[in-house]
Image (cartoon, rainbow, N blue to C red):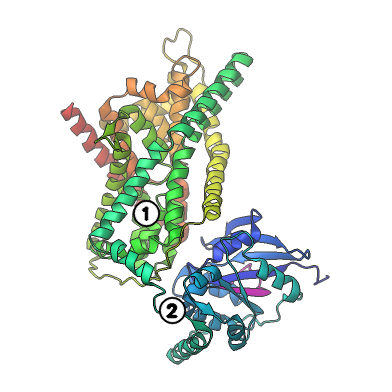
Amino acid sequence: MNTAAAPLHMALLGNPNCGKTALFNLLTGSRQKVANYAGVTVERKTGRLTTPAGRQVLVLDLPGTYSLNAISVDEAITRDVVTGQCPGEPLPDLLVCVTDATNLKLNLRLVLEARRLGVPMVLALNMADMARSQGIEVDVELLARELGVPVVETVAVHSGGASDLVGWLDAHAPHAPSQAAAAPWPAATQEQVLATQLEVRRIFALAVREPATAWTRDDAIDRVVLHPLWGTLVLAATLFLMFQAVFSWASVPMDAISGGMDALGGWVRAHMAEGLLQSLLVDGIIAGAGGVLVFLPQILILFLFILALEDSGYLPRAAFLLDRLMGTVGLSGRSFIPLLSSFACAIPGIMATRTITHWRDRIVTIMIAPLMTCSARLPVYALLVGAFIPARTVGGVFNLQGLVLFALYLGAIVSAMAVAWCFKRLRGDAGHSPLLMELPAYRWPNARNLLHGLYERAMIFIKRVGTIILSLMVILWFLSSFPSPPEGATGAAIQYSLAGIIGRGLETVFSPIGFNWQICIALVPGLAAREVAVGALGTVYALSASGDDVAGQLAPMIAQSWSTATALSLLVWYVFAPQCISTLATVRRETNSWRYALMMAGYLFALAYAASFIAYRLALLWS
């Protein structure tokens, strides 16, 4: 084998918030692949870089860690990869230690630990432009001499910000596989930790000069956003704006997508003879998948806010702000970020709990993560709120539909905290784990990173529509179309189909909470993916009625055929609804036990049924 032609295996190592993932995105562009490490649900991101000289580089983005002395699953994976102990992962040929130039004192500890591994290494001094703007001076040559490793400057948020690193790879990167011996990382003694910290201080004092006022701006902002009163109001206002925007900003693109799907359905009807194939395309695929795809703008707006808050450095502040509040229910502020991630999807939220070092805190966070309103619920909320809540302005400023959506999200948060408190009482543990977390510098969110994140989320959603959701819609169409109605039947054909039989059977269980057989049919495929419920309703009602534009008229149809009490009951059901199967599988992998997954499914079903029953009965009394 010609080792000169073999791709270089390069791993990016660094602290959280150092810009490591941004550098990975800059180096690899769209040539990325996301998977999990063998046997562990920890995200593994790899990509390919071709240098100007034609050198092929395989880039691995390791989970962020402050030290190789691991205390969480994420950190253990990083330690095992760089020591050659991770199953199925080769020892890297080159380590790129990514550091934050504005916070080098904290980052140097990991650099010194990595140097002891003996693997070829280069230090990437990231955010070099921000450091200069803050008056921080880093003597690159002196730093390289003291560390004994090459140092290059990078600015991961600029298009050419990795040119020095790429040039170094062409000129100096090793061409032969690393000769470092793979060996487990020994647990550090107290003396070793102290010696490392003293060496960090010595090197920092020699190579870095920073002004006394470097953090004046951030400290001034923190006096507001971390204040118990003003900070809480800022957080509440931010979340309120986010949910208002979900309805207000998304109306135009949603109308455009809806109009396009309606036009497509009409075109197919006009150019295809009536029959099973036309019904499959129009009533199954277009009415089903199109009914879900229309909510993509709202999901992207929600993700835009989450990504911007993360990129700006605000999220760790929110975690600190809520630490005391979450401590009252037995959690720490460290649970905030996994729970916030669950607003996008419960699966990455549950996976993010691996950064929580205390097992009991981690289990409770996993158990309440599904109560956070994930983006898959958003299509259901948007459909019901749009159908039953008038689109009018309250107080001359606020969108009433946005207020209702905010109330649903707030109700889910309050419910999650109540469940966490119950778990705290059951385990008889009143202790509170203190939160220790780095507060990164504030910065403007980078537009390229935001667009990249939105693109990734859009592709994930579209792939779900084109695979899982589309497959379920085809299955549901088949169940809704066969067998054919008996001779002389007067009702809609779906009433006599397999889906109709299943729906009427489930109706006996769910009729006390106001669900009709059409809703019951939609609940079944919703076990695979929540947003499928909207597409399923589109398919069911398209086959239950006549007309060329049934799929585009789903909201008016349910507004006419459902009572407000039924709509309220279904909204409450989805606040607490049992998780999709993939989420339960993730819980099983994260906890290595079906016990917690089954416990989660059981308590969520009981909670959803009880809450929907109360809401339905109260609504009937009120009406």
Q: Is residue 416 above or below residue 189?
A: above
Front residue of this view, candidates 545 and 339: 339
Q: Residues within 10 Å of mark 1 (few under 14, many from 20)?
A: many
Which residue ends up furthest to the right in the rendered image?
Answer: 2
Q: Position of residue 7 (x, y in %)?
A: 74, 66
Say what secondary structure mark 2 lies in: loop
Indicate which disc, 2 or 1, sits on the residue closer to the N terminus. Answer: 2
Residue 229 — which label? none
Q: Position of residue 160 (x, y in %)?
A: 64, 62
Q: Is residue 470 left or right of residue 316?
A: right
Region of the chain picked out in magenta, as a range: 86-98
At 45% from the left and 46% from the top, the residue drawn is 581
- The quarter of the picture where residue 537 lies is top left
Q: Disc 2 marks which residue? A: 211
Residue type (three-letter) at the residue carrying disc 2: Pro
Q: Is residue 15 above or below residue 346?
A: below
- The quarter of the picture where residue 395 lies is top left
Classify the position of the C terminus by image quarter. top left
At 29% from the left and 52% from the top, the residue drawn is 236
Any part of residue 358 in sight: no
Q: Disc 1 marks which residue? A: 369
Q: CA distance from mark 2 to mark 1?
A: 42 Å
Which residue ends up furthest to the top in the rendered image?
Answer: 488
Front residue of this view, candidates 246 and 222: 222
Classified by dominant secondary structure, the portion drawn in magenta counts as loop
| 89 in the magenta segment | yes
Mark 2 or 1, closer to the camera: 2
Residue type (three-letter) at the residue carrying disc 1: Ala
| 389 in the magenta segment | no
